[in-house]
Amino acid sequence: MNKCFISLKKFVASKPKGGTRKLQEEIKLIGRRIRLLRTAKNLTQTGLAKEMGISQTHLCNIECGRVPVTLPNLLKLHSLLECNMSSFFVDLDEQADAKDKDISLEEVLQIVKLLKQKG
């Protein structure tokens, strides 16, 4: 199992119920954004999953928010969907306003590092 996923699982388990619920909602929102970005590119789950090197079922679970997306998969999605990293973290309706708010790979790695420290 991926180290980032395990750390995120520990982080979720260590948070109070309200925090866990909030994190689960965010995981679902990120999954929905991935689905919207995928469909905007006219890609199927099967096709995108194959390009990512994961199963269609796993991609479905990510898009439905049943499992969080790992950093390596997020980076693959970023490349394959040809989108800004901020696309996964901001509301798509606000995408036009977010052009100058794109977060760097360094900032994403910093977030992951903080998540690992919580675990």
Image: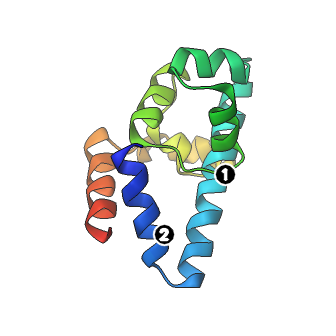
Q: Nearer the viewer, residue 98 or 109?
A: 109
Left of 1 or right of it: where is 116? Answer: left
Query: Residue 38: where, in percent of width, then height?
Result: 67, 27
- Residue type pointed to by label 2: Val
Residue 62 percent coordinates (x, y):
63, 42
Tell me, yes or no, whether the two marked residues, 2 and 1, touch with CB atoms within 8 Å.
Answer: no
Pointer 2: residues within 10 angstroms few (<14), some, or many (20+)?
many
Q: Residue at x 36, y 58 (%)?
A: 7
Query: How far across and how far down the image is residue 55, in percent?
Result: 62, 26
Q: Which residue is located at x 61 percent, y 22 percent?
A: 49
- For label 1, the SS is loop
Q: What residue is drawn where x is 56% and y is 47%?
A: 97
Q: Is residue 50 left or right of residue 119?
A: right
The secondary element bearing badge 2 is classed as helix
Q: Quadrant of residue 48?
A: top right
Whether 73 is drawn above or below 66: the answer is: above
Of all residues, the one furthest to the front in this rendering is: 1
Q: For the residue carrying disc 1, how many other residues have a C-alpha within 10 Å: few (<14), some (14-19), or many (20+)?
A: some
Image location of residue 17, percent across then percent down: 58, 83
**What residue did someone put label 1 on?**
65
Q: Quadrant of the N terminus?
A: top left
Q: Residue at x 43, y 47 (%)?
A: 101
Q: Which residue is mark 2?
A: 12
- Tell me: 28 left or right of 106: right
Front residue of 30 and 83: 30
Quadrant into which the C terminus falls: bottom left
Amino acid marked by disc 1: Gly
